[in-house]
């Protein structure tokens, strides 16, 4: 709140609190960040962990922004390490 008697609602979006967002919506006494996919939190500052056990055959999941990548063990390939490769 601003003004001589604190009667005016300040525009909290002017300080650009939303880090990874499409937009900031000024609310009465606050604000709302419309996060882009892959981000969450009041200021869209938390990267969503997209690793959910998708990698097969002992593959390691590497979290990316709005996605993931499986790092496959030797002898396997494919998006989820589901393909057996001839060595």
Image (spheres, rainbow, N blue to C red):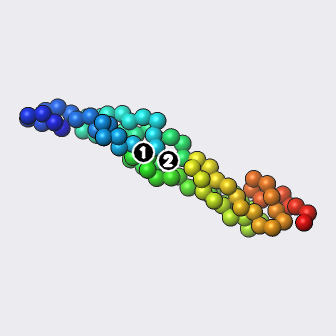
Counting from the top left corner in percent of width and height, residue 68 is at: 64, 53
- The image quadrant that residue 6 belongs to is top left
Counting from the top left corner in percent of width and height, residue 61 is at: 66, 61
Instruction: Work out whether residue 83 or residue 87 is closer to the camera in this orientation and state it.
Output: 87
Task: Report the residue that reaches farthest toward the top.
Answer: 8
Residue depicted at x 43% and y 50%: 45
CA gap, disc 1 to disc 2? 9 Å
Residue depicted at x 46% and y 52%: 46
The residue that disc 2 covers is 39
Counting from the top left corner in percent of width and height, residue 32 is at: 37, 39
2 shown above or below 61: above
| SS at mark 2 in the image | strand
Counting from the top left corner in percent of width and height, residue 38 is at: 54, 47
Q: Earlier in the sequence, mark 1 or mark 2?
A: 1
Picture quarter with the N terminus: top left
In this picture, residue 23 sits left or right of residue 10:
right
Residue depicted at x 75% and y 63%: 72
Task: Report the residue that reaches farthest toward the left.
Answer: 5
Which disc is residue 19 wearing? 1
For the residues bearing labels 1 and 2, Cβ distance under 8 angstroms? yes
Which disc is residue 63 wearing? none
């Amino acid at each position: 709140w601003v003004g001589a008697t604190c009667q005016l609602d300040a525009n909290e979006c002017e300080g650009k609190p939303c880090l990874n967002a499409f937009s900031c919506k000024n609310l009465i006494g606050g604000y709302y960040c419309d996060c882009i996919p892959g981000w969450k939190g009041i200021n869209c500052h938390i990267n969503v962990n997209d690793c959910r056990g998708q990698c097969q055959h002992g593959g390691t999941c590497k979290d990316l922004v709005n996605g993931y990548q499986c790092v496959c063990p030797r002898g396997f390939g494919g998006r989820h390490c589901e393909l057996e490769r001839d060595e």
